Amino acid sequence: MPDLLTQFDPGKCGRFVLVMVMIGLVVRADGGTIRDDRSDADYLSLAAQSQFEPIGKLTLISTGSLICSGTLIAPRYVVYPAHCINQLTDPTTLGFEVGGVTYPVAEIILHPDWPAGNPNPPPTIEGNDIAIIRLATPVTGVTPAQRYRGTTDLGVTGTFVGFGWTGDGLTGQIPGTGGTKRAGENMLDALGSTLGISDNVILSDFDEPSSPTTSVIGAPLPLNLEYQLANKDSGAGVFIFEGGQWFLAGIGVFVVDYNIDEIISNYGDLSGATRIAPHVSWIDSVLCPADFNSDQSVNVTDLLDLLAAWGPCPAPCSEDINDDDAVNVTDLLSLLAGWGVCP
Ligand SMILES: [Ca+2]
Ligand SMILES: [Ca+2]
Ligand SMILES: [Ca+2]
Ligand SMILES: [Ca+2]
């Protein structure tokens, strides 16, 4: 499968001419480009910290080749970008490798507003580039990432963790470098509307240590382990630290040759991540469909709600869990199966 290179229409994107690389198709993938004045070992050891264990590889089972990164958000569920497997609809061909084990995939759940099967979706829907896979068996020995539910994921440091190509801010990404888990930092500088796309996307520029004028958005100086997403980094986890806890705030989806020098992911280039917070209700509804009152638990309140809706129930009808236009014993059993604290 070739990489996708999309030339955005400047008319759609304000004053910007964007060359967008949809990162993360089939090929082995190291994660991200790094500062030219820092040791790669520092980025690799950041990636090895325990809070980043839930980031794994979505692979083709037959070859073990990397499709994308993904982040475990519950023992049976992984979040990743929808564009990664648009054209691969058979979940049994896929595996998720985390903690040294590859788990088979049971189901692919694309965001309902993502155009399934369209490899070149318009930038207007870029904010919905998110999907979930359900694993056939639960992951053990790895603590899932906490989904970010707050509102302060802008103007803070993001830690990006993925398996894509690497290089540094001078060389940009180097083809064929891949497969190693690498982490780096960048400020989450601006929302997507800065580029004329959805505010469900958050943007980060690659700041140059010796040249503050390279800055595109936000502060002009790089962070200590400044980093940029590169090819094959789709699904890189974007983490923030708030209130003493790490949260998954986004997933890497694209990098833009913003400085138009035909070098991808060098100083002066921009990347985008789909934010988790605007999608957290949808994620909750997938992981815990019987929690009708969204209190993160399936209990007697939800049971009474279901019983009150018993009988024919045309859409929209949240109590009709299996979408057959009726609330009946099937939905009741589904609710009972999910009884307790939501994943
Ligand atoms: Ca930056
Ligand atoms: Ca560039
Ligand atoms: Ca509930
Ligand atoms: Ca039903």
Image (tube, rainbow, N blue to C red):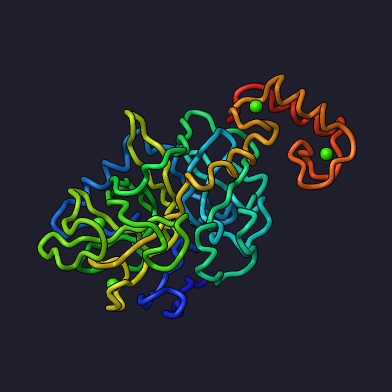
Q: Quadrant of the C terminus?
A: top right
Q: Position of residue 234 (x, y in %)?
A: 45, 57
Q: Residue furthest front?
A: 308
Q: Does residue 211 appear left or right of residue 270 in this picture? A: left
Question: Quick one: 139 or 287, which is closer to the camera?
Answer: 287
Question: Quick one: 53 or 282, which is closer to the camera?
Answer: 282
Image quadrant where residue 49 sits: top left
Q: Is residue 158 above or below residue 50?
A: below
Question: Quick one: 108 or 182, which is closer to the camera?
Answer: 108
Residue drawn at 28 percent across, 61 percent down? 205
Residue drawn at 45 percent across, 50 percent down? 275
Q: Is residue 324 above or below residue 68?
A: above
Q: Position of residue 107 (x, y in %)?
A: 67, 47
Residue drawn at 35 percent across, 41 percent down? 240
Q: Is residue 290 above or below residue 151?
A: above
Q: For ligand 4, give the image quadrant.
A: top right
Residue drawn at 32 percent across, 39 percent down? 48
Q: Does residue 213 appear left or right of residue 239 in this picture? A: left
Q: Is residue 153 above or below residue 304?
A: below
Q: Residue furthest left?
A: 210
Q: Residue furthest top?
A: 300
Image quadrant where residue 283 sits: top right
